[in-house]
């Protein structure tokens, strides 16, 4: 079954954007950008809300920008043909290799999991991720933690009042002080006697 993943950059205090809407502290250096590019190669379809969709529209024509370096052109070449599903109550049409969601989030994910296809089902954006998390649909959280405290804003982790046990799958530290943490949602309760419960 295809995994549903949620991957974004966040501050050490847990926010994807600061209280003023700024996320200028998250531009990746060359090492982190290479990692993010490799990660997007594993994605088969990308689910996103209106705000993130509009932010990412730049990449639909970025290959025409003569100032882009080879690494950004590579990212654009991967992103542009990637199938995308946009969840919005205000948009009537979308551009590029995207379509508007025809059903609720759970229905879309269920249908995508049932369809033949390879690659993860990635969710972008905290609001959509919060809805998926509340429904128990996220299989992996992938956090790139930046060495900054922003004091508030939009949280990476959804604020729902239930416990979710996680299993650490992978960590990596980058030269810029960014730490990558990849956690799998533990579908079975972890026993108090289990070594992973310590």
Image: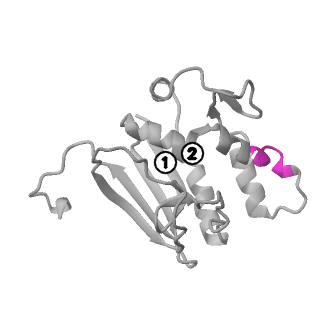
Crowdedness near tag 1: few (<14), some (14–19) or many (≥20) residues, C-alpha within 10 Å: many
Residue 186 percent location from the top left of the image: 28, 47
Q: CA distance from mark 1 to mark 2?
A: 6 Å
Residue 146 percent location from the top left of the image: 53, 70
Q: Is residue 172 above or below residue 112?
A: below
Residue 195 percent location from the top left of the image: 15, 62
Q: Cβ–Cβ below 8 Å for labels 1 and 2?
A: yes
Residue 122 visible within the image: no
Which residue is denoted by mark 2 in the rendering?
Answer: 124
Residue 99: within the magenta?
no
Residue 20 visible within the image: yes
Q: Is residue 166 above or below residue 18?
A: above
Residue 50 percent location from the top left of the image: 66, 37
Q: Earlier in the sequence, mark 1 or mark 2?
A: 1
Residues 111 and 137: in front is 137
Q: Is 61 situated left or right of 93 in this image?
A: right
Q: Which portion, as a residue range, is magenta?
A: 57-63
Q: Residue at x 29, y 48 (%)?
A: 164
Which residue is denoted by mark 1 in the rendering?
Answer: 6
Looking at the rendered structure, the secondary structure element under dot 1 is: strand
**On-image quarter of the C terminus:** bottom left
Q: Residue at x 54, y 21 (%)?
A: 103
């Amino acid at each position: 079954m295809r995994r549903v993943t949620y991957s974004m950059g966040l501050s050490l205090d847990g926010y994807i954007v600061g209280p003023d809407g700024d996320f200028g502290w998250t531009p990746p250096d060359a090492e982190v950008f290479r990692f993010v590019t490799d990660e997007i190669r594993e994605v088969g379809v990308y689910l996103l809300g209106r705000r993130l969709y509009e932010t990412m529209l730049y990449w639909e024509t970025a290959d025409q920008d003569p100032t882009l370096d080879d690494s950004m052109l590579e990212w654009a070449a991967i992103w542009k043909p990637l199938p995308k599903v946009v969840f919005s109550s205000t948009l009537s049409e979308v551009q590029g290799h995207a379509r508007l969601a025809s059903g609720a989030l759970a229905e879309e994910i269920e249908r995508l999991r049932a369809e033949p296809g390879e690659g993860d089902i990635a969710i972008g954006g905290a609001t959509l991720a919060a809805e998926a998390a509340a429904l128990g649909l996220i299989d992996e959280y992938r956090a790139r933690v930046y060495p900054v405290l922003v004091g508030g804003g939009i949280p990476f982790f959804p604020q729902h009042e239930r416990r979710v046990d996680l299993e650490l799958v992978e960590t990596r530290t980058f030269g810029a002080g960014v730490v990558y943490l990849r956690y799998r949602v533990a579908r079975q309760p972890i026993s108090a006697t289990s070594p992973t419960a310590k």
